Amino acid sequence: MTAELDQPDEATESSRPQPRRGRARVWTVRIILMILAVIVLTPPAVAARVWWQARQDERPKSDAILVLGAAQYNGKPSPTLEWRLKHALALYKDGVAPNIVTVGSKAPGDNFTEAGTGKAWLEEQGIPASKLVAIPVGRNTLDSMVAAGKAFRQRDWKSAVIVTDPWHCLRSKTMAGDNDIKPACSPVRSGPSVQTRDTQFSYIMRETGGLLWYGTLGRIYGEQ
């Protein structure tokens, strides 16, 4: 009798639930769903942040106004660059910052840099040369921000109001912050980049992609 009671019941053993395997499957499914949710929801969320930031106009008292580069034509600012310079000039006259920094190198074959062209234009408007800093570095935003960060640290400057197109504000602020600059952004409301809704939508999509790249791989491999 005792021997029979000690024998395991094979049918009973095989029918017992396997809680560990079941829980593992549940967590696997949950993780997969979470990953899919992140993939699906992140781009719209980033686009919304780009759109929201584009609608802000931040003008805190800062060490410098930082004008991001755009094309120049043989030493003459392109329409996009000229609108940025006009806006920087207005901020300077309003007392937002005592200095203006221009950034941007030149394309192959050019004789003038974006930074130098911007600085020359501002001098023509009466801004003292001692209040202007040209940083002729960068064919993209990240390279320019890295160079600007170095220049700010050399001068013991901490903060900047960035002047660029509305849709570019969030990415510019992110990159500036990563280079030891406390950023704000006062976007340009006139010019080629804000003319039509189609143009605005295109810029939002481009900036969303740029931010996603920078947030995942751009900090390692640079801006594309």
Image (spheres, rainbow, N blue to C red):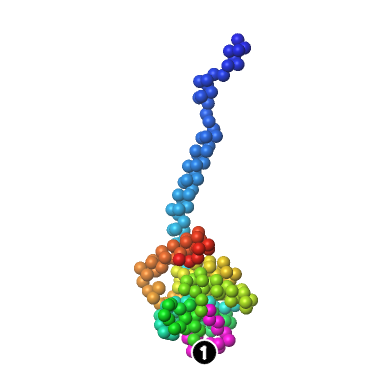
Q: Is residue 26 visible?
A: yes
Report the span colored magenta.
121-135
Q: Position of residue 110 (x, y in %)?
A: 43, 81
- Residue plotted at (39% across, 66% down): 201
Is residue 75 shown above or below 31?
A: below
> Label 1 belongs to which residue?
126
Q: Position of residue 219 (x, y in %)?
A: 53, 63
Is residue 31 shown above or below 125?
A: above
Is residue 11 shown above or below 110?
A: above
Q: Position of residue 103 (x, y in %)?
A: 51, 77
Neighbour class for label 1 at 10 Å: few (<14), some, many (≥20)?
few
Quadrant of the rendering where the C terminus is positioned: bottom left
Residue type, label 1: Gly
Quadrant of the rendering where the N terminus is positioned: top right
- Residue plotted at (47% across, 45% down): 32
- Residue plotted at (47% across, 46% down): 33
Residue toward you, 13 or 51: 13
Residue toward you, 135 or 128: 135
Image quadrant of residue 79?
bottom left
